[in-house]
Image (tube, rainbow, N blue to C red):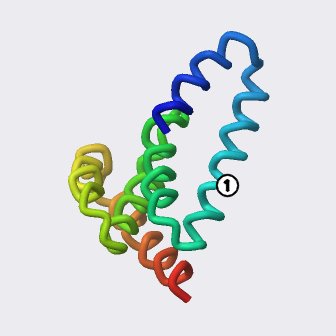
Amino acid sequence: IKKSKIIIENLNKYLKENKIKKIKEQIKFFLEKRAFAKDKRAIIQIAKLYEDFLDPPEFINAYKWYNIAVATGIKSAKNKRDNMLNKLNEKDLLEAQNLSIKLFNKINN
């Protein structure tokens, strides 16, 4: 993720917005595929992608993936998930929790 951030910053100088958006979508697709293969690194990375790399950030999706990361035993995700609480209202939090439960069950079945 750290290296990707540097690469994206450099690419911003050379690529048009639609190309950057397409690259981000491909990264998201790749990480989701890895997350469904139970790759714990991908689970935390996709949460970071939603929080830090998308513009605007998608806090509901970030919380959803951090919550899944916590459920899969990634200890460092707990603080990140809890920090997301400041960025979500009650309705969005409920939605994020429901989405994370559904996705967690889908990943584990």
User: Residue at coordinates 54% horizontally, 36% vertically from top-left?
Assistant: 54
| Residue displayed at 63% across by 50% down | 28
> Is residue 10 depicted above or below 4 in this figure?
above
- At 32% from the left and 50% from the top, the residue drawn is 88
Characterize the local packing of mark 1: few (<14), some (14-19) or many (20 or more) Cα atoms within 10 angstroms. few
Element type at mark 1: helix
Q: Quadrant of the C terminus?
A: bottom right
Identity, as a three-letter code, of the amino acid under mark 1: Phe
Q: Nearer the viewer, residue 87 or 43?
A: 43
Determine which residue is flagged by label 1. Answer: 30
Relative placement, left or right, of 59 versus 25 is left
33 vs 105, nearest the viewer: 33
Residue 105, how many percent across, how many down? 49, 83
Residue reaching furthest to the top: 13
At horizontal 56% and vertical 33% (from top left) the residue drawn is 4
Location of residue 31 in the rendering, given as x and y in whole percent from the top left corner: 60, 55
Judge whether 38 appears above or below 21 on screen: below
Does 52 sit above or below residue 41? above
The reply, left or right, for residue 11 in relation to residue 44 is right
Examine the image and state in which quarter residue 60 appears. Answer: bottom left
The answer to which quarter of the image holds residue 55 is top right
Toward the bottom, the furthest residue is 109
Coordinates of residue 44 in the picture (x, y in percent): 42, 55
Q: Is residue 18 left or right of residue 94?
A: right
Q: Position of residue 72 (x, y in %)?
A: 36, 73
What is the total number of numbered labels drawn onto the structure image? 1
Residue 65, placed above or below residue 86? below
